[in-house]
Image (cartoon, coloured by chain):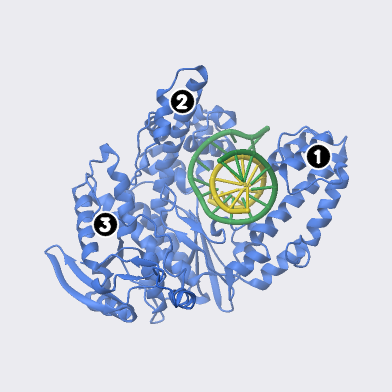
Chain colours: A blue, B yellow, C green
Amino acid sequence: MYIVLGAAEDSAQVATGALPAAWEAVTFTDSGFGTHRRIPTERLGAFITEVEARNHSKTIRWAWADARVLMPLLLDQGVSPFRAHDLRLVQRILVTAETRAQNNLSFTPTIDLLTEDDAPAGTLPPAQVAAGQDSLFEDSLFQPARPQRTFPTAVQLTEELKTQLAAIEASPQPKRLRLLAAAESTGGLIAGEMKFYGIPWNRAIHERILTEALGPRPGLYEKPYEMVKLAGEIRQALGSPKVNVDSPADLLKAMQSAGMRVESTRKWELVSWADENPRLKSQRHAVVDLILRYKKLSRLFSANGWNWLDEWVKDNRFYPAYEVGGVVTGRWGAHGGGAMQIPKDVRSAVQAEEGMILTVADASQVEPRILAAMSADPKLAIAGRDRDLYLGIAELGERTGSALTERAHAKIALLGAMYGATTGESGRLMPHLKKMFPQAIGFTEQAARIGERGGQVTTYLGRTSPAPSADWFERQRNRSTAEAERAAVSASRAWGRFTRNFVVQGTAAEWALCWMSLIRQKLRTTVMFGKPMRSHLVYFLHDEIMIYGPEREAQTCTKIVRESAQQAAELIFGPVPVQFPVTVVSTDNYAKAK
DNA sequence: CCTAAAAGCGCG
DNA sequence: AAAGCGCGCTTTTAGG
């Protein structure tokens, strides 16, 4: 049974930043619409709790416009629903799926939930906006319009839900699409919870890292002592007393006039330059070393320095916001604080409090394993059974007389196959890999060919890749000159690499969603010592999750994480010979996890 | 002057 | 030895 939650008719229009004062709940079952009920906002959490308790929570699915609006509210009231249908997230999947003819999917939204509001709820305190305007324009005949926002009503959302469910049921793969809708919606719940709980972040530890590397916190607009010192040493070593070390162009010129043959200031180029110019001019080595150290410090200071701490860490918690399906492939994006780029160097600031523990889990070689499952390549599946997949490939190569007998080579070749590498070592090793796993490699090549001619592909559960732009098609038509021809071929290949990777990366993202959903479900239903567990998911990064909870729950968390990995694969693919092993570490500190 | 793009580095 | 996929963020630089 679905229960649609939308704004009550008379409360739908509110000042920007505010929420409707009342909501309406409409039940929706196979036999049609049921009761309508009005709930004041402050009673919403209690209402959900009551209904879930009465109906055995698992039979209820809450349908709403956008978890980003309701989850903060509900969590503040101490409630997080079991299951949801996120009409915005599902609409995005269906709208894209509809654009690919082969999907045979017919869907037209009844209300637009995708166009972003210019000011999401919570960014502008309405009371202050109103007060400011009143004092400024008190005597004016022209009262400025107070910015308004209209929330969809329950009645509107019910229409949309009906349309979405009908589109899914009428599609050629309703079972898969249903799972995708459920998993994506649960993602919305989990993202809301993660934002609410935050990652435990020890400010004192982080400050110690900064001080040790950079010196004491500098004043406003000043650079830390260690950076200033290094910059001086770089200028001296290059013989350019005025070079601005922060300007790549300036630094490049200075390096070149000091006799270094480099084309850019990129890290890898400096490293390879140093490798090619050994011993003799040991001073040049020193320059590269200084520059690399400066870059490292500069990055730490600007991306994860004191300003970052002030802005993102409150009461020893880091609160990033996640964007479910924010990446075309279905991966999550994150905004705020660079939550998906936490450098290894500062991870020791993620420290559990007294009596608490972090369970950090990392799924091994997810994308190749996903490829094995979705292409139904038995040899690739077996290569990864009970061992490191790349090692398994190397061992198989050894046994069958292939040139691919080393783990490092197997890894480069397989990654290249999924990314579309054609040159270099990866391109060279590929034919050997194809001989060993024709089914899997053929699958990725098929996806690439579709993209090269401007077609669209879908993931296993049915997320569809976008069509190329009008510019792309125009470029394919225009082959009047040799240069235009080259540009067309290059754009075609680039889009082929995108679709090739889309199917694997996107299906891996679906696996991760199911993995997390199962973990969440088990954490909520497992009873320990007569009480529900207190551990929660607090962090997610593509193929890695973090749970935070009481120490005594660690063992159970580990078990849940492992089981869920394999169950996620079965949920998506059914019984498959592909294993999904997970590295799990229970620790008080994130830096110890890897 | 402000904004958008580029350069560079972080993550998977 | 440094390419082949997907991102976010900061700083500098180029363009209107």
- Using the rendered image, report if marks 3 and 2 lie on a common chain: yes
Q: Return the residue at label 3.
A: A111
Q: Secondary structure at mark 3?
A: loop
Taking A415 as reference, is A520 left or right? left
Q: Return the residue at label 2.
A: A488
When asked about the image quadrant of residue A35, the answer is: bottom left
Q: Nearer the viewer, residue A219 or A561?
A: A219
Q: Residue at x 24, y 46 (%)?
A: A173
Q: Nearer the viewer, residue A486 or A381?
A: A486
Q: Position of residue A291 (x, y in %)?
A: 77, 47
When asked about the image quadrant of residue A479, the answer is: top left
**As drawn, A443 above or below A303:** above
Chain under callout 2: A
Q: Residue at x 50, y 25 (%)?
A: A487
Q: Position of residue A416 (x, y in %)?
A: 52, 35
Circle 3: residue type: Ile
Separation of residues labelled 3 and 2 (CA atoms):
38 Å
Which numbered circle lies on residue A297? none
